Image (spheres, coloured by chain):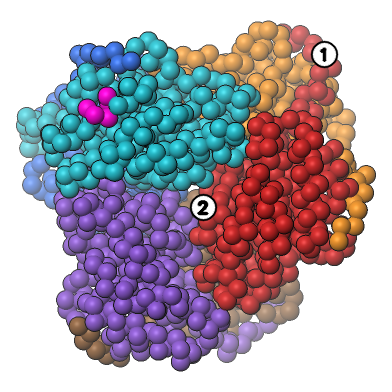
Chain colours: A brown, B purple, C blue, D cyan, E orange, F red
Amino acid sequence: MRPNGLHSVWDADKYALNAWLSIGSSYSAEVIANLPYDAVTVDLQHGMFDFDTALVMLQAISATNAVPMVRVSHNTGWMIQKLLDMGAYGVICPMIDTRADCEAFVRSMRYPPTGDRSFGPSRGLLYGGGDYAAHADETVLAWAMIETEAAIENLNDIVSVDGLDGIYIGPSDLSMTLDGKITNPLSPRVTEVIDLVIAAAHANKKRVGIFCPDAKFAREMIEKGCDLVTVMNDAGLVRQATSALIKDLESAKRVAAR
Amino acid sequence: MRPNGLHSVWDADKYALNAWLSIGSSYSAEVIANLPYDAVTVDLQHGMFDFDTALVMLQAISATNAVPMVRVSHNTGWMIQKLLDMGAYGVICPMIDTRADCEAFVRSMRYPPTGDRSFGPSRGLLYGGGDYAAHADETVLAWAMIETEAAIENLNDIVSVDGLDGIYIGPSDLSMTLDGKITNPLSPRVTEVIDLVIAAAHANKKRVGIFCPDAKFAREMIEKGCDLVTVMNDAGLVRQATSALIKDLESAKRVAAR
Amino acid sequence: MRPNGLHSVWDADKYALNAWLSIGSSYSAEVIANLPYDAVTVDLQHGMFDFDTALVMLQAISATNAVPMVRVSHNTGWMIQKLLDMGAYGVICPMIDTRADCEAFVRSMRYPPTGDRSFGPSRGLLYGGGDYAAHADETVLAWAMIETEAAIENLNDIVSVDGLDGIYIGPSDLSMTLDGKITNPLSPRVTEVIDLVIAAAHANKKRVGIFCPDAKFAREMIEKGCDLVTVMNDAGLVRQATSALIKDLESAKRVAAR
Amino acid sequence: MRPNGLHSVWDADKYALNAWLSIGSSYSAEVIANLPYDAVTVDLQHGMFDFDTALVMLQAISATNAVPMVRVSHNTGWMIQKLLDMGAYGVICPMIDTRADCEAFVRSMRYPPTGDRSFGPSRGLLYGGGDYAAHADETVLAWAMIETEAAIENLNDIVSVDGLDGIYIGPSDLSMTLDGKITNPLSPRVTEVIDLVIAAAHANKKRVGIFCPDAKFAREMIEKGCDLVTVMNDAGLVRQATSALIKDLESAKRVAAR
Amino acid sequence: MRPNGLHSVWDADKYALNAWLSIGSSYSAEVIANLPYDAVTVDLQHGMFDFDTALVMLQAISATNAVPMVRVSHNTGWMIQKLLDMGAYGVICPMIDTRADCEAFVRSMRYPPTGDRSFGPSRGLLYGGGDYAAHADETVLAWAMIETEAAIENLNDIVSVDGLDGIYIGPSDLSMTLDGKITNPLSPRVTEVIDLVIAAAHANKKRVGIFCPDAKFAREMIEKGCDLVTVMNDAGLVRQATSALIKDLESAKRVAAR
Amino acid sequence: MRPNGLHSVWDADKYALNAWLSIGSSYSAEVIANLPYDAVTVDLQHGMFDFDTALVMLQAISATNAVPMVRVSHNTGWMIQKLLDMGAYGVICPMIDTRADCEAFVRSMRYPPTGDRSFGPSRGLLYGGGDYAAHADETVLAWAMIETEAAIENLNDIVSVDGLDGIYIGPSDLSMTLDGKITNPLSPRVTEVIDLVIAAAHANKKRVGIFCPDAKFAREMIEKGCDLVTVMNDAGLVRQATSALIKDLESAKRVAAR
């Protein structure tokens, strides 16, 4: 089976740079997956598309070296399995609040006897190879999102679940649930929780991924030991480049033409 | 009929900033049309999509103040008219080499007796308003692209065509046809031709639009009096923001985590 | 944030006329949203399309003054939130049978601390504006559908839920669950329940919306004080106009031509 | 090969009622094709969709008894043939101005040695049957549109082309080219031309089809012997039913509810 | 209402041959439904598409005599009902482990008072006919999948559920849950369970359907009395024909050409 | 630039096996491109899809080692160039009847100064690499189809066009134009023409590709020295496998079950 490229990144003691897709376009996905990102995540939760479009995005990413991942809308088995069958090599699952949530998530990701994934890895076979079924369980990454007070209380129970590969942190949702609003910079409470999560995950040999609003925050997270950082989504990249452009054009003096 | 916002920009003696879409996505189109662009051009020639997708992109742009324009693949009447019926408020047409080409282009854009546009302005009526048919001819902009030696020889014949609104310059194609390759900076020959086109267009009361690879070039073009500048396409914005990001992350030192 | 136009309708002591979309087409949606409807509802439950198509329909409606609403398939959080993120300004949720159902529905619609909506209002930001997150909770309408015996028993518990904006009545489903069949005119039992629901909702300062098979029924509902009426869906409009047409053509006598 | 149902209509000395699709939706197409229309025309010229969508519309019509027809954007061979291969049983072609135009159109519709249609009737085989290739030429209808002064001058040359099945009249385009505007009722000049076309077509054993803005005009055309009438398109049906609805609701008095 | 063709097959004491679609294409669906299959199943669980595509596939199948069925991703009411509304005449539901699961599944399939299906049979009306609502419950087939130890333990409880029409066996999933791997030939344990299921189903007057990896296995299952056999999916057919082709070409000796 | 894999096949003195796609599905394309085909051709002429779908099919093929090719509908520059920009590594062009046709075709395929291809290789850059523009002309294959009497008369003029890479033979169209019908086996006249074309092409150092209805014919063509053979299209593979399956099931005896 085609190995998961993120393992090589980490084996080389590097952090992975992950792109985040909210635009439902196979071409946009392929443009981005051709840039120096180690992984590209197709976001089914807040992204503006659904499964039919996710398929062609995953196919487009598959023509590059970037690892195709997805974020699902919810910890729902059929949804997770449909995206695995479409060839996702990693699933980020929102709203893991308890050990039971996490165990159910991991079970959805794994074939029997470990889990309860239904058999029929249609595109998985094409992307992963003919021996997909034998190796999928150890190749495909399961990332749980920690987003609520409840999750923080159950942190150790969650991060110690066998078969879980990593924790993915969404600072916006964390701020909303902890502070009732998003602040920039993050509140001390949120910052403290992030540190807590990183420590607990690493203590349990799990990876840590995090969504970063900008490069400065990403640098801090890398320095704290995060294994995977996402910096803005695709729409954010477009907005940032446009802002830079408009600033660059400010000084232009137009000669009255006619 | 809803007026063409580009006229207001020019009446205020400003240049128009135009975005250029190669990504076939209504959401991407809407994200970009919500940024401070005066116009957004849906590129059917080198863009990675076709009419079905162009429709939803034009609809998405229509929910904003940006003027929806298209570049067609070719100077072919049915193609131009299909996009006008879809509500485009401007058409950029490649490969206008002769006065006859330009006249045919303009005729495709206008209703009889001026032109030979077929009647059936389906979405034009929705975006433009109930009196679309009466005012479309003077509202919708016709832009001819000058891209070849032949076109340069026929420059004055082309720019003087009645009903043409502007000339749009594609420096890449111009370089390919004049020099056989694209250089950065542009060759003196191409630069000279651009000046020639601007002068001829303005002398004939036509607008000038130009595609610019970067902000620096755009500033020069604005200072030369160009009426509309496009700076990179959507894929270019994504690439530029990613480059900036990767540069910003270079200094990040990762602590070995586990 | 862009205000919800339905509030202006009601502030002017008028009822709102709502269109109902079962046809999965952005153009059909835009045609209808340009007619004098105050709101247009994209029906994900019995409509013949899914999220990818719902997006372009919501975008098309957004280019008009009509308020974009959706009916979801089920009281499922990720589904409701996906459509809110796509810019819906109202959600009609089927099968609210208990106070707990209704509270869960309302929580899905609201950001923390009020609810548990996840943060990532992708298209919401474009349609609503940059301050979407701060005002979404009070702008976006939550409509619960009362469709079963159980719901009628729990009527007061449901209509008194804080944060709920209105009750939406589907007389067909009500007839099916109460009578086991759909009658025309409605059975006395169904009629009585409708009156009951209107009274309970208004007593609790909630709006009442209702699906009407024809104009006659809609007039009665308006006279009973309903705040929003839907009269047929898009397919119904097409059928009705065709029936009228065929009746109009009956008298045509064809001369044998050849 | 499955026979063309329009022949049965005409053999029974009836006129055919044709629906006209501008909305790009397979469901809308199926809803309409289930109503008592004898034929349903997928309009690629002014309709808001392209080939990918036309395919699913033709498939949806094929599940009913209505005859699937198309209007192409232009008299261009590959375009006509692509739609024939998709199973269209009739093609309406705009802008036939000369005998040469008409002959080229008919050649595109027919297999060698009669014409130059390329072989590969993919969906034609499914809808028409295994003997499609042997009978397509006599089954599939070729309709030429007469829309300009030139066409009227060449009327007899056009209607006498062998293999042409009918003339389709678009009164709007005729008004635009003859009068420079669309009038209601039609100008005497346009009315006279319509009579002329009907007479010339029938004299040459060709059918006559016509687009009608309303039922009154359709009745007149039926009485003049037209063989096929189209009354409004799908968007027009939706608009008409909405107008009727709003008129029906005018008298509704709303009781102030709260 | 249009009768369910599978009943005629069984009334004639024949087994039904069912095709299985994993490719999301209306044309592929129509090609296959035109072959001598009695039923065609659109697989939403492991197929590479979602509802928007399922719709056009169901429409394409509806233009043929094959019975349109679906396999849903999960025993979830809204999902089952959406596909019924799209005109499915049979639903295969995975992971029915208990009598309660099975009863919930059957309730989702039936209108009140028997079940809790919501009313709005949009495309059902087109495919089934105007009296769809009255006859859908007895026309549309409910197939439960037996896939786990738990299901086998509860076999008699499941097969005796009133309103259930059949059991569908997926040997791959059965092998995964019982043996932890897929073997060829099937393990004695799996074979024994299949026999058990067939006997229990038939004893309870339920039909038995089964997925077969090849014709040999299908023949055995037919001889055991299975009422419906599926042999490979669409991708499998393509793979098999390609293998045969490559074998046929092995002997070809190429003359060096240039 | 990524090299064209067909050159390696031919350099190893092997013939290339090409698949032919008429089904508009990215998944079907990927399934087939993962089988041992050297090239996969996306057929825009008789295939049941258009550009939007061709894009995702080309992307899916790009995730494999098969060379992505297209057949265009017509020798029309914008069409050819749009597909090249989408990353096609070969273009098969129908109806090349004269040297002028062939020269125009080749010019459309090549950048200035050799040809008149417009610059903007959007997806070409992603699939081919950053140096696409410099090497596309020698990497991308131009195949002309010989289909008519006229073409045969002009054979030597056509095959000697500089920059043309190969001739692609469609025996069906050849039979239609030469014999007025398709025979099996091919008529002596068609067989003779095929030999003529192979000889002329090879004498001019051009490759020869041919569409074959079955393996037997393909073996003959390989033995005649053809460089690339296509055997059936995707729909044909499905049909063939189903025929084999049905034959395999004939002997199955069903035990009456209930």
The residue nearer to you, when weighing F225 against C63, is F225
Instruction: Kindly report the secondary structure that dominates the magenta region of the rendered protein.
Output: helix
Give the residue drawn at x 64%, y 84%: B255
The residue nearer to you, when weighing F190 against F240, is F190
Disc 2/disc 1 C-alpha distance (Å): 47 Å
**Which residue in the protein does label 1 denote?**
F253
Task: Tell me which label, 2 or 1, sits earlier in the chain.
Answer: 2
Q: Nearer the viewer, mark 2 or mark 1?
A: 2
Percent across and percent down for residue C229 are 20, 35
Tell me the SS state at disc 1: loop
Judge whether F111 appears above or below A255 on screen: above
The residue nearer to you, when weighing C181 against C18, is C18
Task: Name the residue type under label 2.
Answer: Asp
Disc 1: host chain: F
Give the residue drawn at x 61%, y 49%: F95
The image quadrant where one finds the C terminus of chain B is: bottom right
